[in-house]
Amino acid sequence: MQVGIDQIGFYTPNKYVDMVDLAHARNEDVDKYLIGIGQSQMSVADQTQDAVSMGINATQYLPQIDREQVGLLIFGTESGVDQSKSASLFVKSALNLAPEVRTFEVKEACFGMTAGVMIARDYVRLHPYHSAIVIGSDLARYGIGTSGEVTQGAGSVSLLIKANPRILTLNDGHSAFSQDVNDFWRPNNSATALVDGKYSTQVYLDFFQRTFTDYQKLKKLQTSDFTALIYHLPFTKMGLKANRLAIADQDEATSELLATNFTTAACYGRVVGNIYTASLYLSLLSLLENSILPADALIGLFSYGSGAMGEFFSGKTVANYEKMLNPSGTKKLLQRRQKLAIPEYERIFTTALSDPIDGTTLISDEEAGYWYFAGTKNRIRQYRQK
Ligand code: CAA
């Protein structure tokens, strides 16, 4: 029995900053941002769009969920809204899932969603009648005027994992590597992350090489067996560096194919920005919605979470997978975003770093998601639908 990704939902907030405007405002060369970092735009969340509301909205974009079958709901995030209660419980309630559903939140920086995907894959193997929803949802925030500012973003991806999937089967096995390092972290009293950006790039590349090499040995595969290698993309240049390492000694046809598919997989991340846990799965969506791949094309996935945890695994495309996708819907979602002038972005960003005063009711923009965070009442978070 094959198990894998049957449906993919995506949500990103309705506002963005253009990197040309940001470069001008920060007195940087525009090409540093567009080419050196490799980002063109970044989504910006206002106070009504937090990890939970984005996660509900992404899940609403799953075309068909059989609520009776869902037995597991996992929420991967490093932008949690509560130190105790899982973000997944808010989603479960919004989606009206059955009380029997096992549900919890997972955290290991940007690896959280992959941890959820692996748990879900193995769960469905043991319980083939059931399906699992895995959500990754995050706000990447480094702060105004920091060197990480150009690598921010916001969004969520939701996956339905089930038996006989219609998009991507997940192969058995994986190669993992972890080490206790301090490349990126966010203390409990900080709404923005702390990062040693150049060190995190080194660790990421080192973990990629280790896990990719180990995976090839484990599965007796060559680089040329892969149709695409896709990556966690904090900013597209970071993945590009890993992809260059992967294709360094390959023949021309392999290098060209993997380079082209890298560019295709990076299209959405380039305009959405970093969405932490869900970033790898946004790369997958970008690849699948913007190329035509044959059935059984082998896709290698590199997941990385600072702190640090790396994992390489793979999947194969299912015939007619494109019928399960909605590229024009994704295009509309991106095009509906309103461009923010830099002072407006700074105001919205700063306001969203904290919750409103308890008892205040927030109003959501028309173009924001169907579900939104409406403020707290007696310090209990309120999620409303329009
Ligand atoms: N034209 C073209 N390229 C130019 C340029 C120009 N005019 N000016 C500079 N560049 C290039 C530089 O040569 C450099 O390229 P290389 O990396 O290939 O050498 C690139 O632009 C960036 O320049 P700098 O290194 O000088 O930039 P910086 O000091 O401002 O820092 C950064 C860049 C390190 C990426 C910083 O933005 C940062 O720290 N970002 C956060 C990184 C991050 O997210 N790390 C965590 C990764 S994992 C993750 O997502 C976290 C998780 O698990 C939650």
Image (cartoon, grey):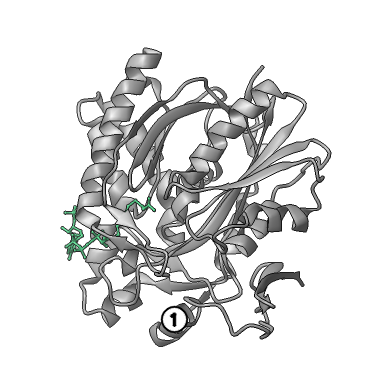
Question: Residue 263 appears at what percent x and percent y?
Answer: 38, 45
Question: Percent position (x, y) of residue 169?
Answer: 58, 26
* Image position of 138 with respect to 149: above or below: above
What residue does disc 1 label? 350
| 232 in relation to 193, above or below | above
Q: Is residue 91 left or right of residue 238?
A: right
Is 312 placed left or right of 200 in the picture? right
Bin the neighbour count of mark 1 within 10 Å (Cα to Cα): few under 14, some 14-19, many 20 and up: some
**Residue 265 left/right relative to 100:** left
Please tell me which residue is depicted at 34% across the width and 19% down the height of the picture. 216
Residue 54 sits in which quadrant? bottom right
Seen in the picture, residue 145 relative to 277 is either above or below; the reply is below
Q: Of residues 176 and 31, which is closer to you in this image?
A: 176
Q: Residue furthest top?
A: 220
Query: Residue 246, located in which quarter of the rendered image?
Result: top left
Number of labels in the image equals: 1
Image point 50% across, 77% down: which residue?
Answer: 352
Q: Quadrant of the N terminus?
A: top right
Looking at the picture, does residue 208 appear above or below residue 3? below
Cβ(mark 1) to ligand 1 < 8 Å? no
Residue lying at 62% horizontally and 57% vertically, measured from the top left: 85
Say whether residue 343 is visible: yes
| Residue 253 visible, this angle | no
Q: Position of residue 273 (x, y in %)?
A: 42, 60
For mark 1, give the secondary structure. Answer: helix
Ligand 1's quadrant: bottom left
Q: List x then y, in percent, for residue 64.
A: 77, 44
The C terminus is located in which quarter?
bottom right
At x 41% / y 82%, what residue is drawn?
Answer: 346
Amino acid, disc 1? Thr
